[in-house]
Amino acid sequence: MASSPITMMKMKLNNCSPPSTAAAARFLPLLGPHQIRFRSSLALFHNPSFPRTIITRSTFSSSSIITAAMASEASVKVIDGKKVAKDVRDEINAEITRMKDSIGVVPGLAVILVGDRKDSATYVRNKKKACETAGIKSYEVCLPENSTEEEVLKYISDFNDDPMVHGILVQLPLPSHMDEEKILHAVCIEKDVDGFHPLNIGQLAMRGREPLFVPCTPKGCIELLHRYNVEIKGKKAVVIGRSNIVGMPAALLLQREDATVSIVHSRTKNPEEITRQADIIIAAVGKPNMVRGSWIKPGAVIIDVGINPVEDATNPRGYRLVGDVCYEEAIKVASAITPVPGGVGPMTIAMLLSNTLLSAKRINNFK
């Protein structure tokens, strides 16, 4: 299930201008974007603790495990999502080449877009471009806004039966006259590369069970922690936001990594106090600059999922993008942080490609 960017917020912020008390007290679910490992030889293997969920590893140049230690602005590590995403795409491309040379199969990803929303169309174009770069065959269906639910279901059925298609993605949001849940459930679970089929989420939540796919944005968050050698086991983690798209799956993934996880949400009392205890923070609430420097424990690692457009008269576009975390304050306290843009965003599409490759390998029993 893929979501478009949230509607631009009509507000003015000067860097990290403090949000109102009311705004800080209200958490909104994130509406926007979202372990097999690759060795240098690109051989794939299963992680015994998480055997069927794809995760990539690399020899990323990180000198030591990032732990909760006092940090300064000069020493903070900026977690470069663009670079990691490129590394992942390069590894995927090499693995696709190996599969094509060995069994003549190229992974295929089908995307269904209904309506003419510009933001959704941009997302689809970006996915198509990423597929081409990685060597994945893309199939695109663009339907008018007034299309019927039955038309969409027919395309899903056709893609379910097409052996050339290994992943199916329905771009959200759908027009209001369509039953979103019914349409998403129609996608074959073996091709649900967005990872939001109820059976996938249910298996993610259960010990001893493994989902076929992990949702792309939460998977990208964990991948960034792995690539930068952030120690998760035994650490205190706080996830801000409990959306089905990011917050809840991210919390489940952190639990699988043996972190002690708390979820901060709209009904949480003393969210600042709870967040300040965390060694790892994943912010996925969709509120610009909500997490202040005072919320952050010195040395904490921050993954900022938020992508919030705010008015900026000095920018030629009239707006700029900020995260859920006040970056200017956070870099003075944290040991590592993702920027916005350029942090989690690039990882979401990279993880979609990763899931599509995983599906093609599984369907064709390719090791």
Image: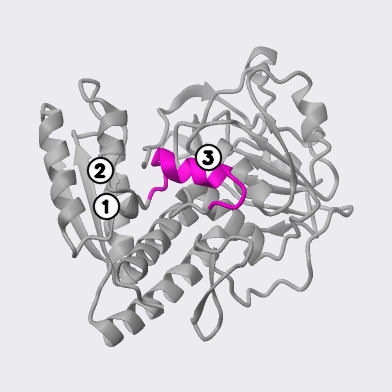
Rounded to the nearest angstrom, the CA distance separating label 2 from label 1 is 6 Å
Of the numbered discs 3 and 2, the one sitting upstream in the chain is 2
Identify which residue, 288 or 320, lies in the foreground.
Answer: 288
Measuring from the top left, give residue 195's x and y in whole percent: 42, 47
Point out the stretch of residues depicted in magenta.
194-209
Identify which residue, 128 or 253, lies in the foreground.
Answer: 253
Q: Is residue 187 above or below residue 233?
A: above
Query: Badge 3 is on which residue?
Result: 246
Mark 2 belongs to which amino acid? Answer: Ala
Q: SS for tag 1?
A: helix
Query: Badge 1 is on which residue?
Result: 125
Mark 3 belongs to which amino acid? Answer: Val
Measuring from the top left, give residue 304's x and y in whole percent: 61, 44
Q: Does the image show residue 233?
A: yes
Residue at coordinates 35% horizontally, 62% vertically from top-left? 359
Residue 202 belongs to magenta span: yes
Query: Badge 2 is on which residue?
Result: 121
Q: Tell me the colour scheme of the image.
A: one colour
Q: Is residue 195 above or below residue 136?
A: above
Residue at coordinates 36% horizontally, 42% vertically from top-left? 2
Where residue 96 sits, quadrant-wise, is bottom left
Contact between labelled residues 1 and 2, with CB atoms less than 8 Å apart: yes
Contact between labelled residues 2 and 3, with CB atoms less than 8 Å apart: no
Identify which residue, 293 or 85, lies in the foreground.
Answer: 85
Mark 1 belongs to which amino acid? Answer: Arg
Give left or right: position of 193 versus 222. Answer: left
Local packing at callout 1 (Cα closer than 10 Å; few below 14, some 14-19, many 20+) is: few
Q: SS for tag 3?
A: loop
Local packing at callout 3 (Cα closer than 10 Å; few below 14, some 14-19, many 20+) is: many
Measuring from the top left, give residue 268's x and y in whole percent: 71, 20
